[in-house]
Image (tube, grey):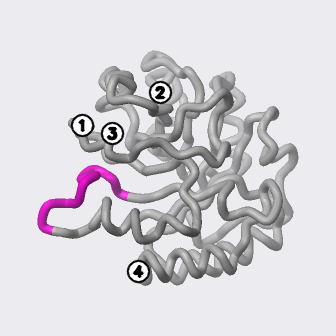
Amino acid sequence: MIIKVCGMRDPNNIRAVEELLTEFSTAWMGFIFWPPSKRYVSERPTYLPEHCQRVGVFVDEDIDQVQRTAADYALDFIQLHGHETPEYLRALCSVCGDSIATIKAFNIATIADLAATKPYEGLADYFLFDAKTALPGGSGSQFDWSILDAYDGDTPFLLSGGIGPEDAEALQSSLQWGGAGGGLLAQCVGIDLNSRFELAPALKDVAALRRFLFQMNCKS
């Protein structure tokens, strides 16, 4: 299972979260490069994770700027959280090559919203399903996870959108990774944690993360 902790910025907090995550399953750490975000990374932190996959989050950004940021931060993944078209994704992949994988985020409120994923099948390596809100990501809002039972695509996805410390039991029940039927969300390969695990924007509560991950039985 992939554990992605997003919205990181503080060097000491990055170290502490990285140390925690490396005790568990596949670990990703997200950095937000969208200026309106409260978790915007305006300058390179003095420490970046060495044992977690680095994910850069962009919203309708110029492709050349995405490429420069990806090189500067040695990103492993580029997450697109805006209105990027399939053509944009093709152009980005052409520029960045095979060295960086892609994640396309979709905002979900109803089953009808899943139709937006179809043009991106075979283009993005992963999808990410978030709650539909006024601004992209980090809202703390959830959506009805049972909507994703209707997802019939081939692209694996991460579940996002207001997952908090109290959701461990519900996630275990819904996901059942490795179970005979794959669980309710059969294509879900990981979870994205952000605002509900914060002491302040871009400052994660490591103790709360630890308790949650043990409850989820994510130990490697």
- The residue at the point 72 percent across, 77 percent down is 16
**Which residue is disc 1 drawn over?**
150
**Which residue is disc 2 drawn over?**
94
**Which residue is disc 3 drawn over?**
147
Residue 102 seen in the current view? no
In contact (CB < 8 Å): disc 3 and disc 2: no
Q: Main secondary structure of the magenta part?
A: loop
Q: For residue 170, which numbered disc appears in the image?
A: none
Q: Earlier in the sequence, mark 2 or mark 4?
A: 2
Q: Amino acid at mark 1?
A: Ala
Eye-nearest disc, 3 or 2: 3
Label 1 residue SS: helix
Residues drawn in magenta: 180-189
* Distance in Å between CA atoms under marks 2 and 4: 39 Å
* Distance in Å between CA atoms under marks 3 and 2: 33 Å
**Location of residue 66 with respect to 15 vertically, above or below:** above
Q: Residues within 10 Å of mark 4 (few under 14, many from 20)?
A: few
* Distance in Å between CA atoms under marks 3 and 1: 6 Å
Label 4 residue SS: loop
In contact (CB < 8 Å): disc 3 and disc 1: yes
Left or right position of 215 against 14? left
